[in-house]
Image (cartoon, coloured by chain):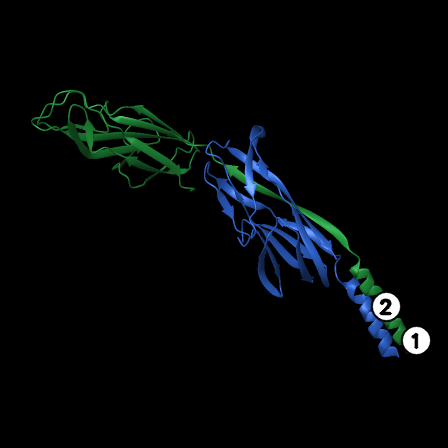
Chain colours: A green, B blue
Amino acid sequence: MNTASKLSLAVLALTLVGASAAQAQSANITATATVLTPLTLTGTANLAFGNVFPGIAKTVAVTDATSGRFTIAGNPGSQVSMTFTLPANLTGPGSLAIGTWTGDHNNTNTTGGTLFTPSGAATLATLDAGTGNRFLFIGATVTPTVAQAAGAYSGTITLNVVYTGL
Amino acid sequence: MTRTLLLGLALLALPRALPAQSVTGIRNLTFGTVIPGVPTTVLQNDAVRSGQFRIAGVIVRNVTIGFTLPTVMNGPLGATMPITFLNNSAGFTTVFQGNTPFNPNTPYNETVWFNATITLGGRVNPTPTQRSGNYTANIVMTVIFL
């Protein structure tokens, strides 16, 4: 082996040895997340029909003072999905049919917002960009029979609200 | 003889022409907006939200990649939010091979040709009453060049 070849091998060996020395290096990143304000849902007023006469249907409109009311509070500007579990009958001394549900949701605590039909299907709404609130007003119609038993009747209206992620 | 000498000099020059080997954090792992009570997952191959590191300045090296992973993210007023990493939450990518998922919870051995990109996903599990606000956690990747 001539001198030049020996020099080349030496250089190669030096290079490989230098490259194979074990060493460690580290780097950092950050995991980030922003948690929205948890939703708060409050039933603020019952849907009250008052006195009902046998054989005469009675409707409470969303604009009536006795409409049912809910308040949603959450992250300002976020979209929510609202679903209802509604009774088909009120219970009491007998069974009193209830239906023809109506709804209105608004960013202020007044009617005149977006009309909708409460049901088990999702209704989308956007919480107020400033307050994070959304107000719901619920109406319906009861239809007593001509032989409806006298007495007090009631049923539960359940509202479920979740963020959609938008 | 002159040709052989030039070859030796070229071998010597090659490593010096490359940048120093390095490990760099390129991109944060970003979960974005998280809804209380709803787990949120970022996949390691998410082109926007996954965390990303880069190994560069290497010719050919066997490496062991390890992570120091958080179990919680820290938020406002001392609040914490659980964060987990699954056995496919990391990915190794080079120009010679596609994305290979691996488990970031245990050391991972690979061969780096010139450079490599390591991506990292994860999952946060906010409680239904998770305190609102911004949460962060530090993630460290250590590469041992063998």
Q: CA distance from mark 1 to mark 2?
A: 12 Å
Q: Residue at x 69, y 55 (%)?
A: B64
Q: Where in the figure is residue B80, as x and y percent of width and height?
A: 56, 33
Q: Where in the figure is residue B138, as x and y percent of width and height?
A: 63, 41
Closer-to-camera residue (A24/B102): B102
Hey, which quadrant is residue A45 in on the image? top left
Closer-to-camera residue (A162/A67): A162
Horizontally, residue B60 falls left or right of residue B78, namely: right
- Which mark is drawn over residue A117? none
Q: Earlier along the polypeptide chain: callout 1 or callout 2?
A: 1
Q: Where in the figure is residue A31, as x and y percent of width and height?
A: 59, 43
Question: Do the residues indicated by labels 1 and 2 lie within the same chain of the protein?
Answer: yes
Horizontally, residue B143 falls left or right of residue A116, namely: right
Label 1 amino acid? Thr
The residue that label 1 is drawn on is: A3
| B108 vs A5: above or below | above
Hey, which quadrant is residue B116 in on the image? bottom right
Label 2 amino acid? Val
Q: Residue at x 67, y 53 (%)?
A: B65
SS under mark 2: helix
Which quarter of the rendered picture does the C terminus of chain B lie within? bottom right
Q: Where in the figure is residue B24, as x and y percent of width and height?
A: 68, 51
Q: Residue at x 23, y 27 (%)?
A: A155
Q: Residue furthest right?
A: A3
| B31 vs B14: above or below | above
How many numbered circles are shown? 2
- Which mark is drawn over residue A11? 2
